[in-house]
Amino acid sequence: MIDFKNGSFVKLKKTDNSIAGDVMGLFTADERIVSTYKGIRDYVVFTTKRIISANVQGMTGKKKDFTSLPYSKIQTFSIETAGVLDLDSELEVYFSGLGKAIFAFTGSSDITLIGKLISEYIL
């Protein structure tokens, strides 16, 4: 599970949707993948209804913890784009009843696209 007290997450890099196979069993009938981002072992899947964070655990990585963060519970969010010296971008999301989660992305990630995606589902 995401540590909502700490609020931080590993740096994520855009990847193909093939890593999301484990979470597809959690999808509702009309839910689909929008984009996926991967850290060292963990990954995040943005769908048409929520953000699913996958925390890969153990030596073999067979044990996984999935945290579902529905867009309907987002109170506010903030994006920080990459700069000249600071090449990373960030997404801060504040969830009703849960607190804050921070997702850090590599500079090659399109953080404005993620912001637009969230806006489409919460506004």
Image (cartoon, grey):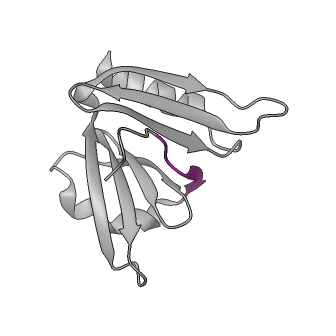
At x 58%, y 34%, the residue is 90
Count the marks: 0
Image x and y of residue 29, in percent: 15, 50
Q: Residue 103 versus residue 16: which sits nearer the camera?
A: 103
At x 71%, y 42%, the residue is 107
- Evaluate whether residue 23 shows in this view: no
Residue, far right:
84
Judge whether residue 13 is colored magenta: yes
Q: Residue 103 versus residue 27: which sits nearer the camera?
A: 103
Q: Is residue 15 above or below residue 63?
A: above
Residue, far top:
123
At x 57%, y 42%, the residue is 104
Image x and y of residue 27, in percent: 21, 53
Judge whether residue 107 is colored magenta: no
The majority secondary structure of the magenta stretch comes to: strand
Q: Is residue 65 above or below residue 94?
A: below
Decide if residue 21 is on the left or right side of residue 40.
left
At x 40%, y 51%, the residue is 45
Q: Is residue 62 above or below residue 53?
A: below
Image x and y of residue 100, in percent: 38, 31
Quarter of the image for residue 22 reads bottom left
Quarter of the image for residue 39 reads bottom right
Image x and y of residue 108, in percent: 70, 44
Decide if residue 82 is on the left or right side of residue 45.
right
For the magenta stretch, what is the residue range?
A: 8-15
Residue, far left:
29
Residue, far front:
5
Q: Is residue 74 above or below residue 107?
A: above
